[in-house]
Image: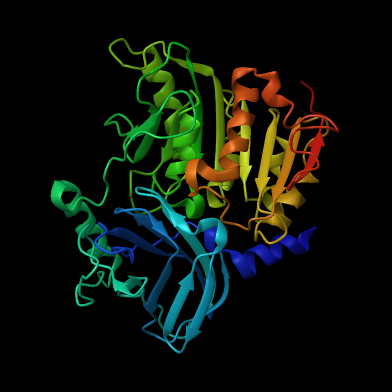
Amino acid sequence: MELPRRRMRAVAAGTLSLALAAVGGALVTTVANAAAGCRVTYAVSSSWPGGFGANVTVTNLGDPVNGWTLTWTFGAGQTIGQLWNGTVTQTGAQVSVANVPYNASIATGASASFGFNGTWNGTNPAPVSFALNGTACTGAVGSPSASASTSASASASTSASASASASASPSTSTSPRPGTGGSGPYPANYETSGGLPNHTIYRPETLPAERLPIFVWGEGGCSANGTASLPFLREIASHGFLVLASGAPNGSGTTTAAMLTQSMDWAVAENARQGSKYYGRLDTGKIAVAGWSCGGLEAYEVSNDPRVTTTGIFSSGLLNDANDYQLRRLTKPIAYFVGGPSDIAYGNAMDDWGKLPAGLPAFMGNLNVGHGGTYTQTNGGEFGRVTVLYLKWRLKGDTAAGTTFVGANCGLCGTQWTVQQKNLTL
């Protein structure tokens, strides 16, 4: 099974690497008189001689967008070869990426993401401006008629400084706190804590009487943006979970596996600290650690922590057979949620699946949506729905939810999902 791992490293290392650089911008809709604005993060996630991988995330700060095309100009002759979660057209230096059906809508406070592999020769500077639906990105919520002359900063360092300044000013904030949301019984929101820097905390707005199990999350591309998958994570919290995501709200930079451990440490400490709003309100004996893409690799690294109840691997798989020791030390149930054969992590995930320890309870679900999943869709889309059911089963003991995954007639069996099971019982 060495071939899938080589393919992942050479062809699609983009979303699984740790090196990121950010460029900020703004987004506008084409709806007349709509309040518009966004933040665009362009992240070069890996680079090799003659090639590179990159991720682009658009966070909508204005009115909802339904159907989008993002355009930019490469400054050094770069070309895009393979792109996922969008449709690309490139003429010379001019690049246009349009949505695909499952990510056409971007709600207020939500994001849409796509990634690509490209080629470069000599230098690989980040694009200096973006436009959405033909309107220049300006970095502020305002009129759709903004001038293209107010384009995004050319450098990641300048963008980061601008973002920090904007956060300090309510009138130009790049990180608005969205309204409560999620389909669960406990409308949820996010917050931060000085005791857990560089993380984003999702919780029910009003803490329920029941204790909250804990879901710890690492983002795709090891991106330190704790709100990149906001609809997905808020949906989980709305069903009575405390969700701790590595990365500050709309943050930049990279994460590490140690940040997942920090999340667990903080939750355990807050549950025991008198005066904390979480005092005695968390179920610290029920912790899931999970991550998407590069975040999944981080989840593997800490999955042997004795506090972990279950591990979730989302569109991810080990990149090198030398890391197979991480599979051999697994003792708690694990679940894979992968984007089907078109997912660049598919081969690696399936290779890991074949190497799991004998007797380990494991679930494998493939939904043919590609590497980007459905995290930015309303309430996290299908991945959000299924993840909530899995967590209800594994962290809350809900056997009715467990029937979604267990047995020949499981709830996902015979549906749009392709399902495999190992050693699963209710």
- Which residue is rendered at x = 23% and y = 76% of the image? 148
x then y, percent, for residue 75: 36, 83
- Which residue is rendered at x = 61% and y = 41% of the image? 300
x then y, percent, for residue 284: 50, 18
Establish if 126 lies above or below 231.
below
Residue farthest toward the bottom in the current orientation of the protein: 92
Establish if 393 lies above or below 388.
above
x then y, percent, for residue 362: 75, 34
Left or right of 99 in this view: 334: right
Q: Is residue 421 shown to the viewer in this render?
A: yes
Residue farthest toward the front in the current orientation of the protein: 32
Establish if 51 lies above or below 384.
below
Left or right of 400 in this view: 55: left
Establish if 255 lies above or below 412.
below
* Quadrant of the image containing the N terminus: bottom right
Closest to the observer, 147 or 420 = 147
Left or right of 129 in this view: 368: right
- Which residue is rendered at x = 34% and y = 13% of the image? 273
Closest to the observer, 340 or 30 = 30
* Quadrant of the image containing the C terminus: top right
Looking at the picture, the colour scheme in use is: rainbow
Q: Is residue 301 shown to the viewer in this render?
A: no
Closest to the observer, 331 or 72 = 72
Residue 205 location, quadrant: top left
x then y, percent, for residue 349: 70, 50
